[in-house]
């Protein structure tokens, strides 16, 4: 499959944007082509903002009011909690830093974003997936028994509290929070275990490496919603969340396991029911529009999509 590249992530909040790359013809990494290189696609350059950091850290803990209001409306907040107090407590438990500020012309970081589509089955892409520097997975994403098709390695696992599972010590847990309670839950799950329920039962204790727990930035989440999915659906899917994280922290991005299989069926690769497609029925995400964005990113030369079967 043809290879394509993607962009590194930088620091800053939703400040005045530095759209696109560093100028047409300027190489931003050591790969043959790099996500952040500008001048290849006006559509991409107009939307891509290098200044918004994908991670929520000590440095960008204070959200702009517009972001705070939007993020706070995504899911019910059962009790009013002071966000800064909750974050300060959380950052006493996890590092609260951005480890991805090493972008530059000397780096070539290749990343695989692995979705959960049944089109992974039978494609035999596991070894190819495992050869990437970063391998990013979403929600359940079991690998045991599926290694031939989905690979065995994981470096980053994107989850929310209700989908969380234990991870090996060498895997980064990327929490995608939808409410203040989610931040309280991760702090609790790494310490006292007092929180057992959000809007659904959640794990009391989580076995992950505390030093590798990362928190997804609501400002970055809103940036995807505003600039890329353009308010189609209530908010972007976890697949979009992982894909745009990769576009901002990697130099080259390969996408696997997104979309329907060759028969047009939407299902997870570990499910027996080929005709399930709950993702498309919820109305929360706009799967057709997200698929269109993936097509446009491919045409812009920013990702390579490996469709599977």
Image: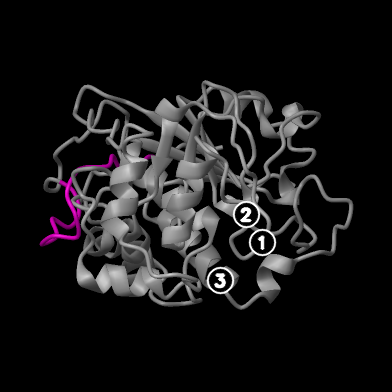
Pick the quarter of the image with the N terminus. Answer: top right
Q: Position of residue 263 (x, y in %)?
A: 80, 60
- Please give the name of the residue rendered at 45% of the width and 56% of the height, measured from the top-left corner: 177
Predominant secondary structure in magenta?
Answer: loop
Q: In this picture, is 289 found above or below 22? A: below
Which residue is situated farthest in the right direction here?
A: 272
Q: In this picture, is 236 found above or below 299? A: below
Mark 2 residue crowding within 10 angstroms, few (<14) / some (14–19) / many (20+): some
Q: Are marks 2 and 1 in contact (CB under 8 Å)?
A: yes
Looking at the image, tell me whether mark 2 or mark 3 is earlier in sequence order. Answer: 2
Front residue of 99 and 151: 99
Looking at the image, tell me whether mark 2 or mark 1 is earlier in sequence order. Answer: 2
Q: Which residues are magenta?
A: 5-21
- Please give the name of the residue rendered at 25% of the width and 44% of the height, measured from the top-left corner: 36
The part of the image, by quadrant, that contains residue 256 is: top right
Q: Position of residue 195 (x, y in %)?
A: 57, 51
Front residue of 193 and 121: 193
Q: Are marks 2 and 3 in contact (CB under 8 Å)?
A: no
Of tags 3 and 1, the one toward the viewer is 1
Alpha carbon of mark 2 to alpha carbon of mark 3: how far?
18 Å
Alpha carbon of mark 3 to alpha carbon of mark 1: how far?
20 Å
Q: Position of residue 97 (x, y in %)?
A: 27, 35
Q: Is residue 8 at least partly visible in the picture?
A: yes
- Please give the name of the residue rendered at 67% of the width and 42% of the height, measured from the top-left corner: 141
Q: Where residue 200 is drawn, which disc sits there? A: 1
Of tags 2 and 1, the one toward the viewer is 1
Q: Are marks 3 and 1 in contact (CB under 8 Å)?
A: no
Q: Where residue 162 is drawn, which disc sits there? A: 2
């Amino acid at each position: 499959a043809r290879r394509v590249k993607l962009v590194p992530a930088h620091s800053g909040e939703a400040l005045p944007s530095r759209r696109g790359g560093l100028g047409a013809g300027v190489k931003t990494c050591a790969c043959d082509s790099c996500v952040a290189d500008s001048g290849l696609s006006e559509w991409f350059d107009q939307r891509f903002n290098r200044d918004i950091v994908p991670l929520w850290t000590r440095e960008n803990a204070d959200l702009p009011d517009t972001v705070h209001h939007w993020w706070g409306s995504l899911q019910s907040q059962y009790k009013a909690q002071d966000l800064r107090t909750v974050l300060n407590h959380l950052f006493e438990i996890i590092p609260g830093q951005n480890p991805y500020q090493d972008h530059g012309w000397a780096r070539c970081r290749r990343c695989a974003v692995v979705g959960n589509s049944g089109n992974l089955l039978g494609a035999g892409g596991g070894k190819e997936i495992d050869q990437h520097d970063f391998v990013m997975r979403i929600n359940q994403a079991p690998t045991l028994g599926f290694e031939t098709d989905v690979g065995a390695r994981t470096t980053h696992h994107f989850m929310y509290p209700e989908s969380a599972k234990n991870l090996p010590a060498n895997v980064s847990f990327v929490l995608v929070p939808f409410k203040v309670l989610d931040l309280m839950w991760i702090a609790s799950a790494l310490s006292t275990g007092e929180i057992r329920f959000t809007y659904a039962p959640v794990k009391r204790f989580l076995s992950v490496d505390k030093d590798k727990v990362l928190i997804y930035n609501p400002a970055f989440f809103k940036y995807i919603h505003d600039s890329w999915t353009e308010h189609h659906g209530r908010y972007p899917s976890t697949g979009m969340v992982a894909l745009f994280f990769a576009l901002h922290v990697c130099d080259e991005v390969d996408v696997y396991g997104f979309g329907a299989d060759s028969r047009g069926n939407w299902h997870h690769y570990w499910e027996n029911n080929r005709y399930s497609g709950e993702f498309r029925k919820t109305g929360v995400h706009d799967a057709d529009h997200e698929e269109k964005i993936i097509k446009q990113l491919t045409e812009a030369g920013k990702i390579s999509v490996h469709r599977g079967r």
